[in-house]
Structures are given as C-alpha cells and as structure tokens.
Image (cartoon, grey):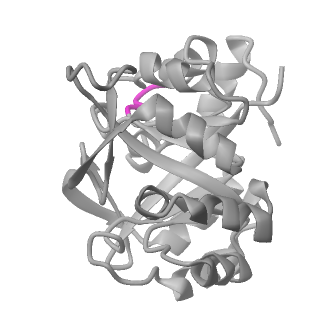
Amino acid sequence: MLIKRIIPCLDVRNKKVTKGVKFRDNVDLGDPIEMAVAYSEGGCDELVLYDITASAERRPIDIDLVREVGKVVHIPFAVGGGIETLDDIYSVLNAGAEKVSVNSLAVKNPAIIAEGAKRFGSQCIVLGMDPVKSDDEKFASGYEITTRGFREFTGMDALDWAKKAEDLGVGEIVVNSVDADGTRDGFELNLTRLISTNVGIPVVASGGAGTPQHLVDVFSEGAADAAIVASMVHSGDYTIRQIKEELARAGIPVRCTW
C-alpha cells in the first residue's frame, strides 16, 4: 500500500489564512507564511495554498505570496485560485510551487488541462472540484459540480467530470465536498469513494476533517490517496504528528520523521 499523504490547506483571503463553513462566514486565522513554515516543520507531506477570492473577484493570484512560501518551505506545495492561462501556470511553478490546481478555469476551458499536462507534465496539473449533493436525476452520480467558491452551478455531473479530466491528462484530483466543508463532521466518504474507485489517478479527499479517526475512515473506507486538513489543525486541537500516530496505529501507512 502506498504512503498516505496529509496535506494542510491554507485558504488565503487578503493575505490572511481564513476558514469558513461551506464556503461562508470565514474567520481570519493567521499569517500564511508563518503557518506554512509551522506545518512544514511539523511533519506534513505537502501543503496546498488557495487564493480563495481570486476567481470570484476575477483577478490574478497573489504570485508574491507564492514566491514567499516557496522560499521558506522544503516540501511540495500546490497553488490554486486565479489561474486563467498557461502563462499563469508557468508563473506559479516558476515561483516555487510543484503543482497548480485548476477548478473554475478547467470547467470553462477543459483544454487547459491537456495543454498544461503537455507543457509542464501531468504531475503538475491538479483538478480541484467542488461537488454538491443533488437529487436531480440528470446527475447520475448524485453530485453536481460547482465553481467560483460555490457561487455557480455548472450542470456537470461530478463523476463524468472526473473521468473527462483524467482523459485530458490531469495528474491528481482534489475532491472537496461542499456539503462537508468546514463542518468537522467527517469526510463525505461516499463521494470520495465514488471518485477514487472510478479513476486511475490519485484522489485527495477534502472537506470535513475534524478528528484523526475521520482520516482513518477516508483512507480505509473512502479509498483516498491523500487527505486535506484545515480546521482541525488550524485550531490547535490536533498536530500533524498526532494525526499520523493515530493513522499508524490503525495500520494506515504514513511517513514519519520523528
């Protein structure tokens, strides 16, 4: 079994890490540079940095912030938000990121996945997807894709979109459940398993992590390859080490540096 990755997520708004529930009522938490260093030194496997208002505000990503994070951490990190062109992808990678996450852009222009994979390699291109539960029969998977921070409904089925993105060359998919986001009630296991068992590329579970047991569940029942954590570590309730120790006790393979 491959090593499972733990990935703290830094949602950034106005140069501050922020966190909300289901994309609303965000509260500022701290400095992204300081938090990136703390998590990097605390044993996480990767980081993800999202400029959460860039797409909604239709502005470029804060490339200076990306560059600063690249200078102070020594683990891979992904960046998303405000990516509009291949040149934007190049700028983010050139600033120090290993991966670029595309979400709204990919829905609007799916060819960017193929073009990005061809130019930079599939391993650099991550599909971020924000599915929400739907009872509409036209969504066979039971989930509809949303974009622009849950502001726009796309009419796209989540599983169909995941398969199409894989065919286009995306190297990884982050499945962020809108329904579970920020609740700390556990990952959306059905959604994660649905995507992870129907594609042949790594799937990262996101949305709902509240306890180490939730990560045990998403790795064992949700078949995820990695899991994003935010509120449970931002709050100080758990450390990366505590999470990994509980995963190891449950027989989940993790990388330990202590």
Most frequent secondary structure within the magenta stretch: loop
* Numbered disc total: 0
Residue 19, compared with residue 140, is above or below; it is below
Q: Residue at x 48, y 21 (%)?
A: 214
**Quadrant in which the N terminus appears:** top right
Report whether residue 227 is seen. no
**Quadrant in which the C terminus appears:** top right
Looking at the image, which is closer to me, 37 or 216? 216
Q: Position of residue 4 (x, y in %)?
A: 72, 31
Q: Which residues are magenta?
A: 208-212
Does residue 155 appear to the left or right of 103 in the view shown?
left
Looking at the image, which is closer to me, 60 or 107? 107
The verdict on residue 210 being magenta is: yes
Q: Residue at x 37, y 35 (%)?
A: 177
Does residue 182 appear to the left or right of 38 in the view shown?
left
Does residue 125 appear to the left or right of 9 in the view shown?
right
Q: Position of residue 53 (x, y in %)?
A: 31, 70
User: Where on the picture, by quarter, is residue 174?
Assistant: top right
Q: Position of residue 71 (x, y in %)?
A: 71, 80
User: Where on the picture, by quarter, is residue 130?
Assistant: top left
Q: Residue at x 62, y 84 (%)?
A: 87
Does residue 31 appear to the left or right of 227 in the view shown?
left
Residue 69, compared with residue 164, is above or below; it is below
